[in-house]
Amino acid sequence: LADAFAAGRRLPKSLAVPLEGDGDARAADAPVEHMAAQAGLWDAFYVRQGTGRAYKERRYLLECFEPLKRARAVLELGCGHGSAALPILRHNAAAAVRGVDLSAQAVSQANDEMTKEGFPAERFAASVGDVSDVAWRPPPPPGSESCEGAANAGASDGAYDCVLLVFTLNAVPPDRAAAVFANAYRALAPGGALLFRDYGLGDVRHVRCLKAVVQDRGNDVGGERGFGEVPTCFVKHDGTHTRFFSLEGVAAMAAEAGFLAAGDEFRYGCVHNVNRKTGIEWDRINITAIWRKPGEP
């Protein structure tokens, strides 16, 4: 992290402060917002962004996650505007995708975008839900609402072949992260796959957040007066959360929920970028993982 920070000295700092209870106790306090307030903040975010067309489809997911090519029922936790669901629907004609998001605005954008792209409600449906709530239960896959018992609480436990958790966990307050894994486990059928990608330690976004902290304190990462344990959880300038993960940290959360590692499909990914005009260098670092729910499909 010290090397990453040194390489990113010329990057602009992020308007963020460490989340209370994460990293050094001297960090600026930032109380965890109630999830209803977080929903309002994310609504405002999606209003500012306009429509889902402002984002690129996440086509790389089909290369990263082989199970998506065969899945028939996919649940995305934190679906946003639908940029992950769209390539799945395009390239897997048998797939039906259920999206869930805390933001009603995101859900509205996702449903509208899929309608514009010609996908019927039997193949995609998004709904509002807090997947970090221990009382949350997975909704049924699209097209199955008329199935007997589908409307009953918990009736869709075990209904999904894959659960997609892509750049969502970072926005969840740390004390609610375990519930996200537990809910993913509940939604999957035996042998089903949890497909995970999120920000890794030392990503350029992390460096920018650390730079803000360092400049506020007037010291340095890893220096004689450094702040010891490096903060990994932050509250951004708009009030939403962001977090950066280690392999060991996410592996522990997955194991605690009951997941099994799927071979060697658990790794850091790093893309080194250089602006040839300015000489500024930065790294995009993520963690990609596939975990399985025990049992036979």
Image: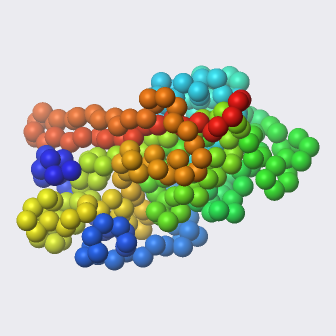
Relative height, residue 173 to residue 155 (above, below): below
Model colouring: rainbow
Which x, y percent locates residue 218? 11, 70
Q: Is any part of residue 19 visible from this angle?
A: yes
Q: Is any part of residue 103 visible from this angle?
A: no
- Left or right of 81? Residue 122 is right
Relative height, residue 44 to residue 205 (above, below): below
Relative height, residue 117 to residue 79 (above, below): above
Residue at (29, 46) in percent of width and height: 203
- Left or right of 54? Residue 296 is right
Residue at (47, 37) in percent of width and height: 289
What is the total number of numbered labels drawn onto the structure image?
A: 0
Which x, y percent locates residue 81? 55, 46
Which x, y percent locates residue 119? 69, 32
Relative height, residue 108 to residue 14 (above, below): above
- Left or right of 262? Residue 137 is right
Quarter of the picture containing the C terminus is top right
* Image quadrant assignment for residue 98: top right
* Image quadrant assignment for residue 120: top right
Which x, y percent locates residue 58? 48, 34
Residue at the farthest left position: 224
Residue at (64, 52) in percent of width and height: 183
Residue at (50, 66) in percent of width and height: 175
